[in-house]
Image (spheres, rainbow, N blue to C red):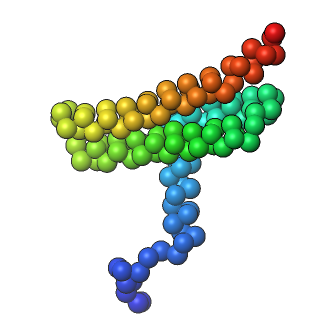
Amino acid sequence: MEKKNPDRKNPLYRSFGYAFQGLFRTIRHERNMQIHCTAAVLVVIFGIALHISEMEWFICLILFGIVMGLECVNTSIEAVVDLVTQERKPLAKKAKDAAAGGVLIAAIMAGIIGCIIFLPKIFRLFS
């Protein structure tokens, strides 16, 4: 049997496969990612119903990517910290809390931007 070259990279399709595995595993097992996905679905439904503009769609898609991408990074940081130590350590807490805080900031900003996009349209429906 031939030895594998450690410098040889996986084919691109394998890299994508690993990325999708990580994404789907995160969606299946992380409550906060499920919340973000639900919010994204609701935004898409409301966006279609309220006929948001092309620019508003771009903004929503960028925000989906930022929030969900940060949630994946947060999940990976938590997993690595848990791999390194199960003990309560101040630096482990700092890493986990900072990563979660990054997701929180992005989610709050996405919520505020969502209100700026959607509330005027909703108010117009009822006036």
Locate the C terminus by quadrant. Answer: top right
Residue 72 appears at what percent x and percent y? 46, 45
Quadrant assignment, res 94:
top left
- Of residues 20 and 63, the one nearer the viewer is 63
Quadrant assignment, res 92:
top left
- Of residues 99 and 47, the one nearer the viewer is 47
Q: Is residue 91 above or below residue 73?
A: above
For the question of whether residue 41 can be seen, the reply is: no
Residue at point 55%, 31% (across, down) = 110
Residue 41 appears at what percent x and percent y? 68, 34
Q: Is residue 95 left or right of residue 61?
A: left
Residue at point 62%, 22% (across, down) = 115
Q: Is residue 47 above or below residue 124?
A: below
For the question of whether residue 122 can be seen, the reply is: yes
- Of residues 68 and 6, the one nearer the viewer is 68
Q: Which residue lies most toward the top here?
A: 127
Q: Is residue 75 left or right of residue 42?
A: left
Residue 31 appears at what percent x and percent y? 51, 32
Q: Which residue lies most toward the bottom here?
A: 2
Residue at point 81%, 16% (across, down) = 125
